[in-house]
Image: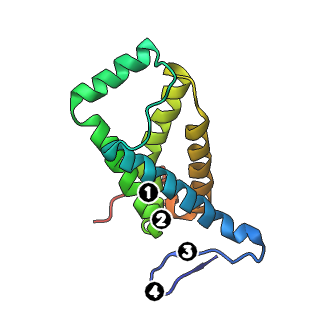
Amino acid sequence: MTLDAQTGAAEAPQSKGFARFLPAVARVLMGLGFTVFGLNGFLHFMPEPKQQMSDAATALMTGFAKSGYMFPLVAGTQLVVGILLLANLFVPLALVLIMPVLVNILAFHIFVQPGILPGAILTALELFLAWCYRDYYRTVLSARARPNL
């Protein structure tokens, strides 16, 4: 691995097979998913699920709706992250921003309302991309970080 002279970012050696395209494919798929779901949060163009929501899911969604900020916050986060991923800008930051949303999507579908497939696919893409961009997280994961004064 070498450092880019202009940006100081780590450059991984380029592989020659199809695998070199996998991070870009995962990034675009994840970006498309979150852009569509984020836009849907504001424009409501996707049909409501036909499956009846459980009482717990109804209570949770009612609470989110009554808060007045949770649904716009989640939709806005999804939309911003989706656009960043599609534009290939601040990808490590976008992956960090969307992780709490993904954790809650998975938790919701595990504990409250069955139907985990979309969340599981997006989480798999997230984990794959986080691994691909792991060098950018090394300093954040320092156990005994010291401030620069």
Please tell me whether mark 2 sits on a helix, a strand or a loop: helix
Is residue 4 visible in the rendered image? The answer is yes
Q: Which residue is mark 2?
A: 86
Q: Nearer the viewer, residue 87 or 99?
A: 87
Please tell me whether mark 3 sits on a helix, a strand or a loop: strand
Q: Which residue is mark 1?
A: 82
Q: Residue at x 29, y 35 (%)?
A: 70
Q: Amino acid at mark 4?
A: Gln
Q: Are marks 1 and 4 in contact (CB under 8 Å)?
A: no
Q: Which residue is mark 4?
A: 6
Q: Quadrant of residue 16?
A: bottom right
The crowd level at tag 1 (other Cα within 10 Å; few <14, some 14-19, many 20+) is many
Q: Are marks 3 and 2 in contact (CB under 8 Å)?
A: no
How many marks are shown on the rendered structure?
Answer: 4
Please tell me whether mark 1 sits on a helix, a strand or a loop: helix
Q: In what quadrant of the picture does the N terminus appear?
A: bottom right
Q: Choose the circle earlier in sequence order: 1 or 3.
A: 3
CA gap between label 3 and label 2 equals 21 Å
CA gap between label 2 and label 1 equals 6 Å
Q: Which residue is mark 3?
A: 10
From the viewer's perspective, is residue 11 above or below residue 29? below
Q: Amino acid at mark 2?
A: Leu
Q: In the rendered structure, find residue 108 and report the number of the disc placed on it.
A: none
CA gap between label 2 and label 4 equals 23 Å
- Is 70 on the left or on the right of 146, as rendered? left
Q: Residue at x 50, y 51 (%)?
A: 33
Q: Residue at x 62, y 46 (%)?
A: 124
